[in-house]
Image: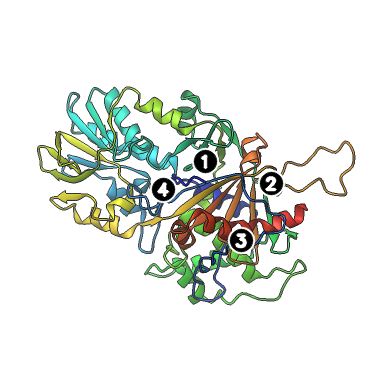
Amino acid sequence: MDSRAASGGMARRTFLTASLSGIAAVALSSCTWPPPEPTPTRAATPSPIPGVPKPTAMERSRWADDPFARGAFSFDAVGSTPELREALGEPVSDRLVFAGEACSTDAPGTLQGARDSGLRAAAHVMRPGSPGERVAVIGAGVAGLTAARELLDAGYEVIVLEARDRIGGRVDTVEDPSGDGTAEFGAMFIGDDAGLELALTAAGVDVRPTPDSTLVRTLDGTAVEPSDAGWQAIAAAQAWAQGSSEDVSLATALATSGVLPLPDEPAADGTTPADWLRHSLASGVEPATGALPTTVSAQRFDAARAEASVAFVTGALSDWLTSLAEPLEVVLSSAVVRIAYDDERVGLRFDSGESLSADRAVVTVPLGVLQTDTIAFEPALPLLHQRAVATLGMGVVDTVRMRFDEAFWRSPAPATARPGDEPAEPPVFLSTVGGVPAVGLWIDVGVASGTGEPVLVGLIAAEQARRLEQVSDREFREAVLPGLAPFATAAG
């Protein structure tokens, strides 16, 4: 089975689903976060999981381990503010401009946030610049290619420098090895953004409105109505945190505000408010941020941001990026390791030892890379830029794409259905309540895309993602497939 590095961007859709359904995610029945479960011991013959067949194909991402990403997307860690994101995107000496989803105050962690930041960066360059100047754009992702095209169209001499051997950055479209068409290993959904939708349409990239349909099952396979008890607890903790002059983590706010402990008396369906808080954290907060509640800002975590309508990308995002890059000079496999700048020029040095000079530069490397010593800046960046890089968080959300012979998780028509009834469309989003799953949320790609193909994509976030990146494909399957047992039990 293949393993691939992929892209982020899925968190917004994940959190929207949880928010609209009143559900969400993993763990916090006390003031401490439970550690990830240990890696399963490998047996000579793995025990079969009742009703869950072995996938016929599997591919997965490893964003934390990717040296050119170091994570999937940014999130608001404790101490983060919109002003820090805005400051990160401000020009330095009118020679350097940073761009990328981490610079977006409106839509961080999304395709539209990356695109908008690229447009703003180009405007920053053009304000003091003049057509004919040479501009180096570091990074051939959404932000970099957007900025580069704006500058090229305005008459600037543009060169795009990309460390990878492909364009796209954290957007990774691959040929589906087990079926027709392509598969996205990064962003799969887009938000309600007219400019982005227009750009995708112009590039021939189709999207499909996604119904807000979710299914939650208990560990024994019983379908349950999602409860908003978890989200209510989170909202109460955030309201308490807003009254404090000092930001704290979401976990601290839950523990200190008096919200916990939640009642442990089970409802008629067997679930408790504590179960739903764990669910809200695992299927909502974690995939939305790529981080544990112990690091997410209680003041800045924004549920309302997830309420925009979304659509599933049924085309290939690579077609859009290829159309942006077509007239550009793009140099691949060229990692920049040093950026020197003054009031007149910008000098770049590559890992090969070669160098390049430009009038100005747009830096679009991910926040996770900026947080390492991969690129040296001479002189050092202004203190506010340094503070933004150090304070903002870089989350990890990995995706696993599994193809099966049949969609065993799709329940048959209910016994109460009558002949001639319009069949109900299966849910797009699947999750379980009552445990701490390795996969916080499953997406039925066949339903989301309208193709019906038996493909699931799982979202694995935060420390679960970091842990599972280090295991073999066989160990990985053994860790994630048990999470599908409740759906196989119900369908069977």
Judging by the rendered image, the residue that carries numbered circle 1 is 188
Regarding residue 303, the answer to whether it shows in the image is: no
Whichever of labels 4 and 2 marks the residue nearer the N terminus, that label is 4
Q: Closer to the observer: label 4 or label 1? A: 1
Up the image or down, 331 lies above or below 489; here it is above
Q: Is residue 262 left or right of residue 409?
A: left
Q: CA distance from mark 1 to mark 3?
A: 35 Å
Q: Secondary structure at mark 4?
A: loop
Say which amino acid is labelled 4.
Answer: Pro
Q: Are marks 1 and 3 in contact (CB under 8 Å)?
A: no
Q: Is residue 272 left or right of residue 253?
A: right
For image coordinates 34% across by 43% down, the residue present is 100
- Sequence-wise, the earlier of marks 2 and 1 is 1
Q: Badge 3, how many Cα within 10 Å: few under 14, some, many 20+?
A: few
Q: CA distance from mark 2 to mark 1?
A: 17 Å
Q: Secondary structure at mark 3?
A: loop
Q: Earlier in the sequence, mark 1 or mark 3?
A: 3
User: Residue 114's quadrant in the figure?
Assistant: top left
Q: Which mark is residue 45?
A: 3
Q: Amino acid at mark 3?
A: Thr
Across and down, in percent, residue 246 comes to: 37, 69
Residue drawn at 45 percent across, 56 percent down: 469
Q: Nearer the viewer, mark 4 or mark 2?
A: 2
Distance from the alpha carbon under mark 4 to that under mark 3 = 44 Å
Q: Nearer the viewer, residue 289 or 408?
A: 408
Residue at image x 73%, y 41%?
425
Q: Which residue is mark 4?
A: 108
